[in-house]
Image (cartoon, rainbow, N blue to C red):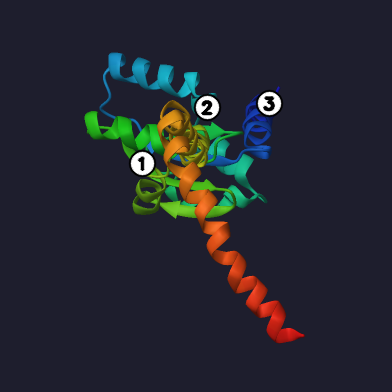
Amino acid sequence: MAKVELKQPIVDTIAGEVKDAASVVLVDYRGLTVAQDTELRKQLRDAGIIYKVYKNTMMKRAFEGTEYAALEEHLAGPSAIAISKEDATAPARILCKFAKDAKALELKAGVIEGMVYDTAGLTELSKIPSREELLSKLLGSLQSPITNFARVIKQIAEQGGEVAAEEAPAAEEAPAAEAPAEETAEATEE
């Protein structure tokens, strides 16, 4: 069996993983301790992100003819790949956060929703909150006025006896004062 035939299943696996990916991020993992690498893999796995180390030549072959072909120039030295199929910013967010503590981890480049980003671009994208965080903020901002309205109504209901008693005489006087003005307006029209 030729070497190419042995490597083709690996290339097909990589191509299959990146096929429907929302984002792909390349990192240089040199210098990470075993404990750091284990912790990084756990965080990425918990977020539903595929994180693997492949040979650069295998990744180059898998990226050929896809939107990820632009990553070929960044495939130098040891490279690991983080692939997310759902949350496009999750790999950048998790890897950048982890890289703050583990200085040995270096982001190389990534493709997020078809756009190629360098390290600076990935760092900026990592600041975008996750979809769940954005939805919770949206619901909080939608719920806030309703909650405040409910509080005001409750306070009015609690003070209802006092307020209703004070407003009743004022409400009876106001229509009486307006009535002559209406009669005057009707008289001038005739």
Q: Which residue is mark 1?
A: 107
Does the rendering let one see residue 78?
no
Cα separation, mark 1 vs mark 3, equals 27 Å
Q: Amino acid at mark 1?
A: Leu
The residue lying toward the viewer, choosing from 177 and 45, is: 177
Q: Is residue 78 left or right of residue 56?
A: left
Q: Amino acid at mark 3?
A: Pro
What residue is drawn where x is 25% and y is 27%?
31
- Which circle's residue, 2 or 1, is located before the other in the chain? 2
The mark lying in front, picked from 1 and 3, is: 1
Report x, y in % for residue 77. Answer: 37, 39
- Which circle's residue, 2 or 3, is located before the other in the chain? 3
The mark lying in front, picked from 2 and 3, is: 2
Please rate how many residues cluster around mark 1, counting C-alpha atoms within 10 Å: few if below 14, some from 14 to 19, many from 20.
many
Q: Which residue is mark 3?
A: 9
The residue lying toward the viewer, choosing from 123 and 162, is: 162
Circle 3 SS class: helix
Quarter holding the N terminus is top right
Report x, y in % for residue 34. Answer: 30, 15
Report x, y in % for residue 4. Answer: 66, 31
